[in-house]
Image (spheres, helix red, strand yellow):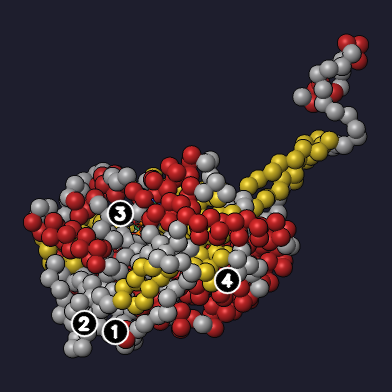
Amino acid sequence: MASQARYDTQPLYYNGQRQTTSETFQTINPATGESLGNVCKANQQSVHLAVQSAKEAFPKWSTTPPIERSRILLKAVALLRARNDDIARTETHDTGKAYSETSVVDVVTGADVLEYYANLIASGGLNGETTQLRPDAWVYTTKAPLGVCAGIGAWNYPIQIALWKSAPCLAAGNCMVYKPSEFTPLHALTLAEIYAEAGVPPGVFNVVQGAGDVGAMLTSHPDVAKVSFTGQVSTGGKVAGAAAAGMKYVTMELGGKSPCIILPDAPLENAVDGAMMANFYSTGQVCTNGTRVFVPRSMLSSFETRLLEKLRNIRSGDLFDPDTNFGPLVSRVHHEKVLKYIRHGITQDRARLIAGGPEPPVLPAGISSRGFWVQPTVFSDCTDNMKITTDEIFGPVLCILPYDDNSADWQTTLLRRANATKLGLAAGVFTRDLDAAHRFIAGLEAGITWINTWGESPAEMSVGGWKLSGLGVENGRRGLENWVQNKSTLVEMGGSVATAFVEPTTAKGPQSKL
Ligand code: NDP
């Protein structure tokens, strides 16, 4: 049972070894509110030592042939898959997500990305380009790793985020110091030791633990060349600002308030299933959630009725019961934040609450009510300027925004409303009309889009936000480009140098090359 879980004190990990510090913090089981164990907190010195261990490992790892790096990383993939269930159990304890989810998604999608990049670098993924300029001159490019990179993760998909960052980082020949969220620290040592067991040399992957101050120490460390960050827009702004001072590369995977557009011809079942996945999976703690669900007024009643019926399929309870598919929120502070938004939706925004609310859910017998449980909540008749439709809540709060489809320009109006946000992470359309789907997708201001589905994010698909939702991408071929720097080399054959400094009488030929 979740309530009996207890973990040994989690050390940091650098120089290929567990490292301890005197200061610790607790990690809490979201299902019970009880401590799962203590975690060593990094300080300025341990952050520096972790960075130095990465710096020392870099020359050898970056010059290890890609095919050898690939072999090592593929061994780590096999170890991750072999230990899937143990790691998933830890993730369920730490995040509060149901084991029915963590056992089939969290490790699986992380290992897939590691496998993808290991295979990509073994098959020319780090090759440059050659451009023939003239018969006797060409340009070739090479891709060089960046050096020591920092990874800073959020708490919603801990091991997946750690792998989505470390996989392309290590594959490209960089070394990483990774800081998980203080709310979900338990996966990181396991990942470091799996890398080591697979043959990743000491110093190539390191872990420091702690809160935002530890992240800030990493971001500002002069030997860190890049920061890959997943988290809130406001934190991302601080991290990118600090990184800019040192002219460091950044990848920013930030928040969203994504539109989920149901067109009038969409099959009702698909539309409702899509909206459910886009709002209640992982108890709504998914960055790409489609929390603004645009429903044609003509379909509103049937959509609401079917949604309410399907809400009965959401089951809170023992997180290790295979039927449980809805866990608590990750932490007390996040629980309070989400409940505040729900109360605001009722009392200030005055949206129509059709399901859920701020009261605690009824839990099966034997389940601790001291956990951070919440009801799946649905508001209807929402409008564009309500706080619940503009702010990222990051919880199970679905907002239905009805729209009219009887004017000549209804599609333009709908698109404008969908784009009326400073965020641009994801968007999606449900319809039978693929022409309309592609027209909408072309007009949507978001980096991740879906047609007639929601949420799948395979290794092959590059993902990243537009507008305030981020910078750069993770995954796919383009994801690897975010971990290398380009070098362009112009080669001139035949021994003649392009020069302006020639004797007047011989002023021909070479100048034309300038
Ligand atoms: P936060 O921004 O609160 O924290 C993210 C990470 O940054 C944590 O490890 C945090 O440490 C650390 N941190 C906090 N302050 C600083 C600082 N000044 N310098 C460096 N690091 C710092 O995000 P959450 O953990 O609350 O995650 C939820 C957010 O993440 C949501 O907005 C969600 O949309 C977004 N997200 C985006 C994804 C994407 O791919 N676009 C994917 C998943 C989530 P600590 O928590 O220990 O204090």
Spatial distance from mark 4 to mark 3, Cα to Cα? 41 Å
Q: Is residue 366 above or below residue 277?
A: below
Q: Nearer the viewer, residue 228 or 403?
A: 228
Q: Say whether disc 1 or disc 2 marks the residue closer to the N-terminus.
A: 1
Q: Secondary structure at mark 2?
A: loop
Spatial distance from mark 1 to mark 3, Cα to Cα? 34 Å
Q: Badge 3 is on which residue? A: 257
Q: Secondary structure at mark 1?
A: helix
With 251 as the anchor, is 233 left or right in this view? left
Spatial distance from mark 1 to mark 2, Cα to Cα? 8 Å
Spatial distance from mark 2 to mark 3, Cα to Cα? 32 Å
Q: Position of residue 229 (x, y in %)?
A: 45, 54
Q: Secondary structure at mark 4?
A: strand
Identify the mark at residue 368; answer none if there is no mark: 2
Looking at numbered disc 1 in the image, what kind of residue is underneath it? Ser
Looking at numbered disc 4 in the image, what kind of residue is underneath it? Gln
Q: Position of residue 251 (x, y in %)?
A: 49, 51
Q: Badge 4 is on which residue? A: 17
**Front: mark 1 or 3:** 1
Q: Badge 1 is on which residue? A: 3
Q: Say whether disc 1 or disc 4 marks the residue closer to the N-terminus.
A: 1
Q: Say whether disc 1 or disc 3 marks the residue closer to the N-terminus.
A: 1
Q: Quadrant of residue 59?
A: bottom right
Looking at numbered disc 3 in the image, what kind of residue is underneath it? Lys
Q: Is residue 410 above or below residue 205?
A: above
Residue 219 in sight: yes
Looking at numbered disc 2 in the image, what kind of residue is underneath it? Ser
Does the residue tagged 4 have its C-beta within 8 Å of any atom of ligand 1? no
Spatial distance from mark 2 to mark 4, Cα to Cα? 37 Å
Q: Are marks 1 and 2 in contact (CB under 8 Å)?
A: yes
Residue 446 in sight: no
